[in-house]
Amino acid sequence: MTPRLPVVARLLTLLALMTFLWCGSNARADETAVRTAEHQKFTEDFWTYLKDKYGAWNQLGAFPSDAPTPEAGSEGTIYANDAAAKDLAKLSFGSIVVVEHMRDGKPYAVSALFRARPGVNTKNDDWYELYYLADGTIVKSSADSSKYNHKGFLTKVIDDRLWILPLDSPHIASLIEGEIPEKHATLPGAGPDRKTIKTDSRETAIQYLFAQPGYITHFEDGRAWIFAKGSAAAAHFKSDGPPEKHVTRVGAGPMRTTIKAPDADTIDTFLAKTNK
């Protein structure tokens, strides 16, 4: 089903306005808000457009390689609008790809990627990403402004403590509302700016702290393998496993996690990006 032009044109207009605000001063009435009122309205309007349509779109057997992998991953039921389905190897502007994330046989969240128009998000080949709960509650989008944002996680500062949950956590809705999960781990001073981290587990905190842009991380027996994204070493690891020759730094990583990497320079540049 191809979207009607007036609807798409309205969404593009909203996105153009929101992009201007995103790339401009980013001034907002509430300095603690992750998105402006205009940006919030766009996310709501996009869900209104999407929710009753994507289920009738083209269902795909695999996530298209020409689209960026969503923050929450590509596992689930995958849909593409007609603009995308015309050529999955080269997705054109106007393409929308949706992943319906499932838990216990029911959808719990939806990732939507919209390749709207040139200049919308040059860092991601002009793909704009939104992540919703199944009821349409917006969790994250490409233009959110959050100092402690890391890919794959929702963060929220409550009482000067940094709350962190993975996007597939069943407690996401509660955290959005500022409600604190009863069972949680507290890690004093472990976060960026030495903030106390509160999260569902110590493992989540470690994964969050290692989720640095430009790097791929793999955890094995409590140790973290790190590779520069797009490097030959990362490709080799994906196809053949850990390299025979590598460097190990015991307790050098966030929360004293042991780091392994193909060379010392990878570790040094990675640690320079972390704020332990």
Image (tube, helix red, strand yellow):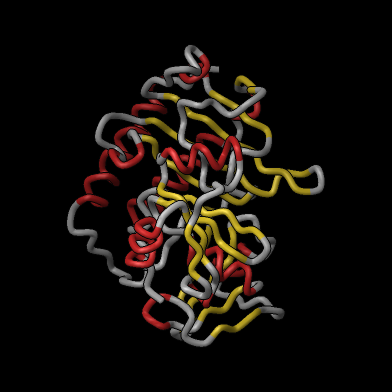
197 or 106, nearer to the observer = 197
Could you tell me residue 189's position as x and y percent?
47, 85
**Image quarter for residue 30?**
bottom left
Query: Which residue is most to the front?
Result: 245
Looking at the rendered image, the quarter that the N terminus falls into is: top right
Quadrant occupied by the C terminus: bottom left
Q: Is residue 166 left or right of residue 40?
A: right
Q: Is residue 183 left or right of residue 239?
A: right
Nearest the eye: 199 or 93: 199
User: Residue placed at 48% from the left, 73% from the top?
Assistant: 254
Residue 110 is left or right of residue 249, and the answer is: right
Q: 72 above or below 189?
A: above
- Residue at 40 percent of width and 53 percent of height: 40
User: Is residue 78 shown above or below 89?
Assistant: below
Residue at 29 percent across and 35 percent down: it is: 13
Q: Which residue sits at x=29%, y=46%?
A: 18
Q: Residue furthest left?
A: 25
Q: Is residue 142 above or below residue 204?
A: above
Can you give x and y, in whole percent of width and height, for residue 73 in the image? 58, 44
- Quarter of the rendering containing residue 203: bottom right
> Residue placed farthest to the right in the image?
104
The answer to whether residue 112 is visible is no
Expressed as whole percent of the image width and height from the top left, the position of residue 6 reads: 38, 24
